[in-house]
């Protein structure tokens, strides 16, 4: 059996994620003793023995739908977002006061092309303003994108709103970067399980674990409740052009 909570796992939150999983496992009555942190996320998401993992909306609607089951969607209480939703935050250096239309003419840092918050949401938002990135830099992670902006490799980047909050709370990036704009909300990163599992039973265990978390861990992880967002809402989110298509039109 395998379980992973790697989407918001960083040094400051790792132990809280371990305690969250231990509470979930206890309520469930089975599961691996430890979270997996040393495997490719696609291997985790598609593992036939997957008990619980968190994926992103874009991988779910483009590749995982039909291969996994939705367990539920965590609500992080993000500002200006409905329960179970999040948004993307465009960030730039504090010393760079250009607006989004000017920044996007420079280098746009994004984590990967199958990221809802790092690619799909910002590209869709920009297209609605008749904008598109001039030059792309794939970084491999939201924190990497933030660092790329801070050190001058990129002019602007799009970060998951919760990741941006965690970076402000636990790193100095909040002092180096400023928020430029936010995208409209979309359903946040869902918990999933393998096809042979009982998603309702796992959802019940997750709800129990959230309730039993200490106040400190709940604040650290920003976990409020587990919501239920139907697959149709994830599948209805638009897919933007690929990075290759964007580059080809520049």
Image (cartoon, rainbow, N blue to C red):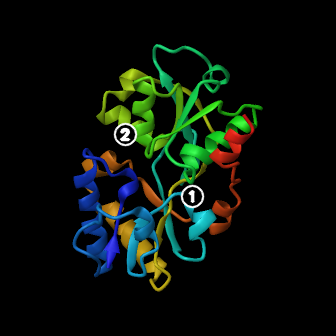
* Residue 105 point in image, percent of width and height: 65, 24
Mark number, residue 110: none
Q: In this orientation, which residue lies closer to the viewer: 49 or 203?
A: 49
Asked whether the beta carbons under mark 2 and mark 1 sit within 8 Å of each other, the answer is no
Residue at 71% of width from left, 41% of height from top? 248
Q: Residue furthest bottom?
A: 196
Residue at 38% of width from left, 81% of height from top? 49
Residue at 55% of width from left, 14% of height from top? 97
Q: In this orientation, which residue lies closer to the viewer: 76 or 153?
A: 153
Residue at 38% of width from left, 63% of height from top? 40
Per the image, the residue denoted by label 1 is 57
Per the image, the residue denoted by label 2 is 166
Q: Residues within 10 Å of mark 1 (few under 14, many from 20)?
A: many
Is 247 placed left or right of 158 in the picture?
Answer: right
Q: Quadrant of residue 184?
A: top right
Is 243 placed left or right of 177 in the picture?
Answer: right
* Residue 80 point in image, percent of width and height: 57, 39
* Residue 78 point in image, percent of width and height: 49, 43
Mark found first going from the N terminus, 2 or 1: 1
């Amino acid at each position: 059996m395998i379980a992973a909570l790697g989407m918001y796992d960083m040094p400051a939150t790792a132990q809280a994620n371990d305690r969250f999983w231990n509470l979930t496992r206890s309520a469930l009555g089975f599961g691996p003793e430890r979270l997996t942190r040393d495997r490719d996320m696609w291997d985790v998401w598609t593992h036939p023995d997957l008990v619980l993992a968190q994926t992103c909306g874009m991988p779910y609607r483009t590749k995982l739908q039909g291969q996994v089951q939705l367990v539920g969607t965590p609500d992080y209480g993000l500002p200006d977002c409905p329960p179970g939703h999040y948004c993307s935050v465009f960030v730039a250096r504090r010393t760079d006061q250009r607006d989004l239309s000017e920044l996007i003419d420079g280098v746009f840092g994004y984590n990967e092309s199958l990221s809802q918050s790092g690619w799909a949401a910002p590209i869709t938002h920009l297209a609605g303003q008749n904008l598109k990135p001039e030059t792309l830099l794939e970084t491999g992670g939201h924190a990497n994108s933030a660092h790329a902006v801070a050190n001058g490799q990129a002019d602007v980047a799009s970060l998951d709103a919760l990741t941006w909050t965690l970076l402000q709370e636990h790193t100095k990036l909040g002092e180096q970067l400023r928020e430029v704009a936010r995208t409209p909300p979309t359903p946040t990163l869902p918990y999933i399980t393998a096809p042979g599992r009982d998603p309702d039973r796992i959802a019940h265990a997750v709800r129990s674990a959230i309730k039993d978390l200490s106040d400190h861990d709940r604040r650290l992880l920003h976990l409020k409740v587990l919501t239920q967002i139907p697959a149709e809402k994830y599948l209805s989110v638009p897919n933007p052009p690929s990075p290759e298509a964007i580059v080809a039109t520049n």
